[in-house]
Amino acid sequence: MEPHRTNVIIFPKVREVAEAAERAKQEAKERGHAKRARLSAGAKQAAATIGTGALATVLYLVFLILWWLRGPVRFLLGLASFASLITLPIMWLGLDSANKTHIMLSVTGVGLGASALMWFYDALLMRLAPEPILFST
């Protein structure tokens, strides 16, 4: 049997040119991927910046509304706390009821709860504040 023969004549120069063209096409493709990756990273950074700015704006608006309501909220909570503080000794001395302990514990709970809510409200405002703040009252 004869070895496999073919009529195709291979020209070495043509093969080199074809390989060079293939390499150039591959490099162009890689440059395109790199450019898209850079654009994608830039788009991600822009979206992150816009999202951060929008979140900061919403938090600042919430802070301003809560800051505006701080006076009335503290007044009402302080009134409840003070009223329970004044009511406790009066009830202890003057109330003669079967469920005196339950009533006094409820009034104590209202007073301590109002004080805790005042503290929590101020802590929330300090947390939302865009800059560190100190409260005068």
Image: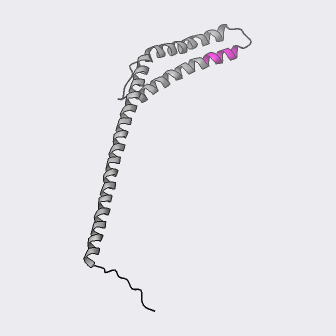
For image coordinates 36% across by 39% down, the residue present is 47
Is 63 located above or below residue 90 in the figure? below
For image coordinates 40% across by 28% down, the residue present is 58
Display colour scheme: one colour
Is 24 located above or below residue 64 in the figure? below
Q: Which residues are magenta?
A: 98-108
Q: Residue lying farthest front?
A: 7
For image coordinates 61% across by 20% down, the residue present is 109
Q: Classify residue 69 as left or right of residue 131.
A: right
Q: Position of residue 51 (x, y in %)?
A: 38, 36
In the rendered image, which quarter is residue 32 located in?
bottom left
Is 130 located above or below residue 83 in the figure? below
Q: Nearer the viewer, residue 39 or 136?
A: 39
Q: Classify residue 43 as left or right of residue 95.
A: left
Q: Position of residue 56 (x, y in %)?
A: 38, 31
For image coordinates 30% across by 79% down, the residue present is 10
Q: Residue lying farthest top?
A: 94
In the rendered image, which quarter is residue 60 located in?
top left
Q: Position of residue 84 (x, y in %)?
A: 58, 13
Q: Position of residue 104 (x, y in %)?
A: 65, 15
Q: Residue lying farthest bottom?
A: 1
Q: Is 3 a magenta residue?
A: no
Is 94 located above or below residue 20 in the figure? above
- Magenta region, mostly helix, strand or loop? helix
Q: Classify residue 82 as left or right of residue 134.
A: right
Q: Nearer the viewer, residue 66 or 39?
A: 39
Q: Nearer the viewer, residue 106 or 131?
A: 131
Q: Is 102 a magenta residue?
A: yes
* Quadrant into which the C terminus falls: top left
> How many numbered markers are drawn?
0
